[in-house]
Amino acid sequence: MYAKTFVYVSNAQDGNIDAYSMDQATGALTSMGKTDAGKVVMPMALSADKKFLYAVVRSDPFKVVTYAIDSATGALAQKATAPLPDSMPYVSTDRTGRFLFTASYGGDKAAVSPIGADGLVEGPATQVIPTGRNAHAILIDRTNRFVFVPNLGSDQVLEFLFDAKTGQLTANDPPLIKTHGPRHLAFSPDNKYLYVLSELDGHVTQFALDQTKGTLTEVDKVGSVPPEAGLVPGVPQAPVGAAPPPASAADDKPKIWAADLAIAPSGRFLYSTERTTSKIALFSVASGTGKLTYVTNFATEKQPRGIRIDPTGTYLVASGEKSDRLSVYKIDQDGGKLTEIGRYPVGNGANWVEIVEFP
């Protein structure tokens, strides 16, 4: 008997969320319709108990919407909205499900909002922290003690201590580690390593996480974009809704523009996306050392923004901001290679992907 698996995709331009049921035996998706959210709905996160979906709207007034997930049907029901202090391109929760984390690329800040005992986010942020330029993500480690915020424009990852009782973030010592153009993060299943994707050069940097202090040490750096792709390093993008930066002489050359990364539940494979070439890169992960080896890349939806692996590690779902289709791939359990299962209609500006499974 297979579990019930549901897939949600935010459609930024349409202002809604597509929902699908996934056949766990085949990976095939069946559309369950759309749910209104708000223009420029982008990042989403599941609650710790999987009963709620949090979706962030990046048009004014900036807000987070809480949806209850029907475990039998996967249907979403809006239960609450709460203001956010800025346009936030990333959202996550702590491991207890009591606090919501958001980060603002254009506003150079991170924030903590309370989650009620009922799973709803109804009040404003209780802590707003200035960051370096272009905070692009915020993620807590698997022990629920350490939080990391990559600042793409300042070439650094901020390191915080987290108090799970109060929800307060405090700068660690040291408060940051330098690395080029960091965007998104993923922890190894054993919590020993943090992998950081650079939007600007496509490298994935492996950091060792000190389990006592919560500080990072660089271990290795591996490229995701092969030289034959013909791309040059990218530059920080303007925030959503802002004017693009002034043109330069190098603007006629296609640039690296990496977006998302995901690690398999087994910890054996890691994937990242590059939007200019519309590719998904595959890395193998060495047992014990966590070191990455670039394997190959796969063509995917145009301008891939979000990828997510289902909880069983069997399938990967990819969205493309300039595609009207969603791709589902089966993951080869020996080598991690992707085989396309099918493509399915999705809304305009398909962005974030979340997958939830119920017994």
Image (spheres, helix red, strand yellow):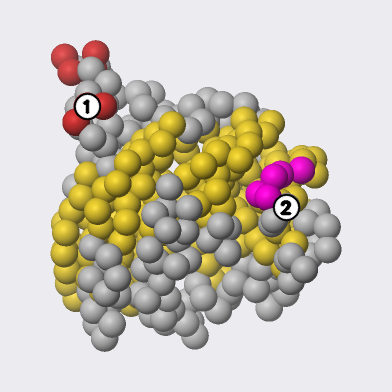
Point out the residue furthest to the right here. 72
Q: Which of 242 and 71 is in front in this view?
A: 71
Above or below, 318 relative to 14? below
Horizontal side of residue 227 vs 51, given as left or right: left
- Residue in view at x 63 percent, y 37 percent: 342
User: First in sequence: mark 2 or mark 1?
Assistant: 2
Can the viewer see residue 171? no
Above or below, 217 relative to 247? below
Which numbered circle lies on residue 353?
none
Q: Mark 2 points at which residue?
A: 23
Q: What's the amino acid at mark 1?
A: Glu
In the image, which residues are magenta? 26-30
Q: Nearer the viewer, residue 187 or 53?
A: 187
Q: What element carries label 2?
A: loop
Q: What's the amino acid at mark 2?
A: Asp
Horizontal side of residue 197 vs 9, given as left or right: left
Question: Picture quarter containing residue 290?
Answer: bottom left
Q: Name the residue under label 1.
A: 228
Q: Nearer the viewer, residue 205 or 34?
A: 205
Residue 71 in percent (x, y) is at 79, 65
Q: What element carries label 1?
A: helix
Can the viewer see residue 194? yes
Point out the residue furthest to the front here. 334
- Residue in view at x 16 percent, y 64 percent: 219
Residue 143 magenta-highlighted: no
Alpha carbon distance from label 2 to label 1:
37 Å
Contact (CB < 8 A) between labels 2 and 1?
no
Residue 132 in percent (x, y) is at 26, 52
User: Quick one: quadrant of the N terminus?
Assistant: bottom right
Which secondary structure dominates the residues rendered in magenta? Answer: loop
